[in-house]
Image: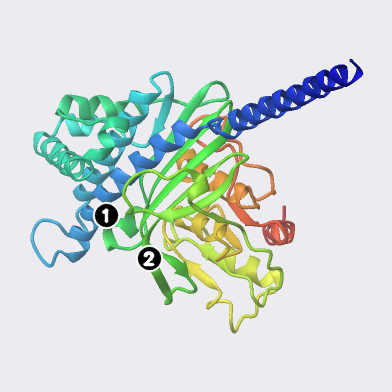
Amino acid sequence: MHRSKYLIYITVIVIALLSFKKFNFIRCFTMSSKTPPYYKELQVATLAVKRASILTKQLSDSISQAKSGTITKEDKSPVTIGDFASQAIINNAIKLNFPDDEIVGEEDSQDLQDNAKLSSEVLNLITKVQQETSEYDDVIGDISSEELVFKSIDYGNSEGGAKGRFWALDPIDGTKGFLRGDQFAVCLALIDQGKVVLGVIGCPNLAQYVESNENHHGTVGGLYSAIAGQGSYYSDLFITGFKPLDQQQRIHMSERESPNVLKVVEGVEKGHSSHSTQAQIKDKIGFDQSTVSKQTINLDSQVKYCLLASGQADIYLRLPIDDTYREKIWDHAAGNVLVYEAGGKVGDIHGTTLDFSKGRYLNSKGVIAANSKVFNTVIDAVKDVLKL
């Protein structure tokens, strides 16, 4: 009798333990299989940026390789065509998947509607790249008429702001680089309640490794992605399809501090930032005058943020050319989240965090980005030189 009761107790305990383990297994499996925040947004942004990057890369190559004819480096129409086509592709993809989201875009379609030849060329470019990437259609759709081109471009008319969700798009960032066949980028960011939560940057001509102005090597064409709280990542831009972040290469900012080994990225065009002021800042930080030029890398577009985030550069200086100039949000939103998620910092000339909730422009002066070890040192140098 006692033995039977003992066996019953043991059986009950075993069943309870098995049930508890089964419950925990199911709970853990459910938690591990839960879709990460902004997963769908990243998938759509990635495929749209990839499609637009292929189109703009082909167009940039055709311009830079042209020896004669109507397409030359002085002809602005190829840039216009590329901007329109890229913005149409990406805006259409966003609205197809997130119809309630707004978009802050650089272009509107009025000039295109007034030019039948240009409109036809834009649609032809889009049709060609859609045929080459038809496997993306199930996710990001397609564009089959000039009317839809116009409509898609004009989705980018949002004024942004502090409430709700909106996307910030630069369809071709780095116009001069695009025309030279050099560095440019397709940049897309998602801003939620005034905060940048996602960024995707397609860099069609950027080598994976950039050691100096003269030494670029490795795979050409990089995709740089970041989601708030999930880190920053690199993958091959021209590999077909979408890879979740956990299948991409995690990247991190450097932790270098000595001016002897620090590298600075700056723009190529002097009309966008004050190179003379930036030279004084580098001197104040402690760069050696005999080596500072070799430690400075000049690049167009937001590819500069990509070099920072991947630890290949340490400081980005973009000093205002005058007191009235204000940066556009689409020129910095994607790069901003990429650097933060890689462990760096971004601010204005005072070191204040950039605010993307004030409309289409940043209500601040300049942009300074750096690894966390030297950011305060850089800001102190900026304040000293600018006498702030």
Q: Residue 240 at what x, y percent from top left?
A: 31, 49
| Residue 302 in view of the camera | yes
Q: Which residue is mark 2?
A: 219
| Residue 327 in view of the camera | no
Is 318 placed above or below 101 here?
Answer: below
Q: Amino acid at mark 2?
A: Thr
Q: Quadrant of residue 289?
A: bottom right
Q: Residue furthest right?
A: 2
Alpha-carbon distance for marks 2 and 1? 15 Å
Q: Residue 328 at what x, y percent from top left?
A: 47, 40
Is 195 placed above or below 170 here?
Answer: above
User: Is 280 in front, or is 152?
Assistant: 152
Q: Amino acid at mark 1?
A: Lys
Q: With 145 as the anchor, is 378 left or right in this view?
A: right
Q: Residue 219 at what x, y percent from top left?
A: 38, 65
Q: Which residue is mark 1?
A: 57
User: Is 386 in front, or is 168?
Assistant: 168
Looking at the image, is mark 2 or mark 1 nearer the viewer? Answer: 2
Q: Quadrant of residue 152?
A: top left
Q: Residue at x 66, y 27 (%)?
A: 22
